[in-house]
């Protein structure tokens, strides 16, 4: 189930406080400014900087 649009409007990058892009395959939130990818597991965004991976 995709993340709700209301939740997506509230979430920001924990590092720069910038906007995030939602991607469905694989499900993740991407910060283009920091070039970080935050995973979404079981419909829960993992917004920890230590859990993010670099954007390829």
Image (cartoon, helix red, strand yellow):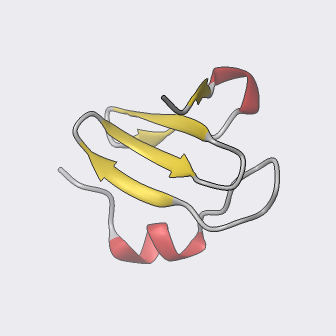
Along the viewing direction, whichever of 45 and 13 lies nearer the viewer: 13
Q: Where residue 18 sits in the image (x, y, percent)? A: 71, 65
* Residue at position x 74%, y 32% in the image: 49
Q: Is residue 50 above or below residue 9?
A: above
Q: Residue at x 55, y 61 (%)?
A: 20
- Which residue extends farthest left? 1
Name the foreground residue: 4 vs 27: 27
In this picture, residue 55 sits left or right of residue 43: right
Task: State whether residue 44 appears in this view.
Answer: yes
Looking at the picture, tell me which residue is in the foreground, 26 or 10. Answer: 26
- How many labels sit on residues? 0
Residue at the spot x=59%, y=54% of the render? Answer: 32
Left-right relation of 39 to 50: left
In the rendered image, the residue lying farthest to the right is 16
Instruction: Indicate the quadrant where residue 53 lies.
Output: top right
Residue 24 vertical position relative to residue 4 in the rendered view, above or below: above
Q: Residue 44: x and y, percent?
A: 43, 41
Looking at the picture, how far across and down is residue 25, in whole percent? Answer: 22, 38
Image: 36 above or below 51: below
Residue 36 vs 3, above or below: the answer is above
Residue 2 position in % (x across, y down): 23, 55
Taking 12 as reference, is 42 left or right?
Answer: left
Q: Quadrant of residue 3?
A: bottom left
Residue appearing at x 51%, y 76% in the figure: 9
Choose top left, top right, bottom left or bottom right for residue 5.
bottom left
Can residue 46 be seen?
no
């Amino acid at each position: 189930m995709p993340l709700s649009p209301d939740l997506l409007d509230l979430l920001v990058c924990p590092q720069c406080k910038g906007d995030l892009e939602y991607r469905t395959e694989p499900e993740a939130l991407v910060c283009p400014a920091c070039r970080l990818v935050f995973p979404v597991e079981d419909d829960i965004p993992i917004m920890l900087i230590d859990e993010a991976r670099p954007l390829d």
